[in-house]
Amino acid sequence: MIRRAEVADHPWIIASGAEAYHDLGDYTRILPSWLEQPGVLAWIDHDAQGRGRGFAMLGFYTEDPTGARSAAGTQHVVADLLALAVLPLYQRRGIGGKLLSHVIEVAERVAPSSHISQLRLTVAEDNVGAQRLYARTGFRIVDGSATYDRGQRALRMARPLGTPARK
């Protein structure tokens, strides 16, 4: 079951994310800074006993830090899948796919009123399983030049919003 994360869930998200992303950087520092942002939403997948199995974080922000508006008077808002992680004990059970579908549904609902055309993410270059999951839901590689804190190469992927995903 997926539910919206609350402030009381933040320590669990931070600890779980730090474990899941330990090779990529200091997520005990990164995740709290994301969770504090007003445009970031988080969800937790949990079992019947309420034990967390995974989480996802979706951020909405303006791409232009100056807040400049287009000729039509709208800001360019971006949707970014900041994090998606499933605890090792629960991997390969469809939980990541359910969390990803939930994030896509939320982004799709917000897209028309916020003028968001795509959902973006960054994934480790060697995380082939995650890349396949993203590709199955309509994400395509748009840039291979990103790097994480510890220098690991990453790919940037994007999925158009407002169009059905390929299964």
Image (cartoon, grey):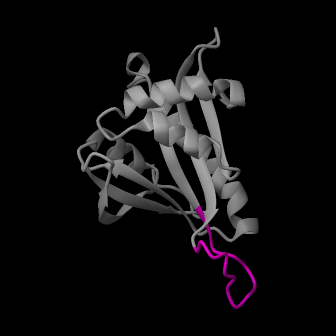
At a point 63% along the width and 62% down the height, the residue shown is: 61
Q: Which residues are magenta?
A: 64-78
Q: From this viewpoint, which residue is outermost toward the bottom?
A: 71
Residue 74 falls inside the magenta stretch: yes
Q: Please, what is the dominant secondary structure of the magenta stretch?
A: loop
Q: Quadrant of residue 91?
A: top left
At a point 59% along the width and 48% down the height, the residue shown is: 58
Q: From this viewpoint, which residue is outermost toward the front?
A: 29
Provide residue 20's location: percent of width, then percent of height: 39, 30
Provide residue 60's location: percent of width, then percent of height: 63, 57
Q: Is residue 94 visible?
A: no
At a point 73% along the width and 88% down the height, the residue shown is: 72
Q: Quadrant of residue 79?
A: bottom right
Q: Is residue 19 above or below residue 98?
A: above
Q: Is residue 17 left or right of residue 13?
A: left
At a point 34% along the width and 32% down the height, the residue shown is: 22
> What is the number of callouts on the image?
0
Q: Nearer the viewer, residue 55 or 109?
A: 55
Provide residue 92's location: percent of width, then percent of height: 38, 25
Q: Nearer the viewer, residue 10 or 123?
A: 10
Q: Is residue 49 left or right of residue 114?
A: left
Residue 15 falls inside the magenta stretch: no
Quadrant placement of the N terminus: top right
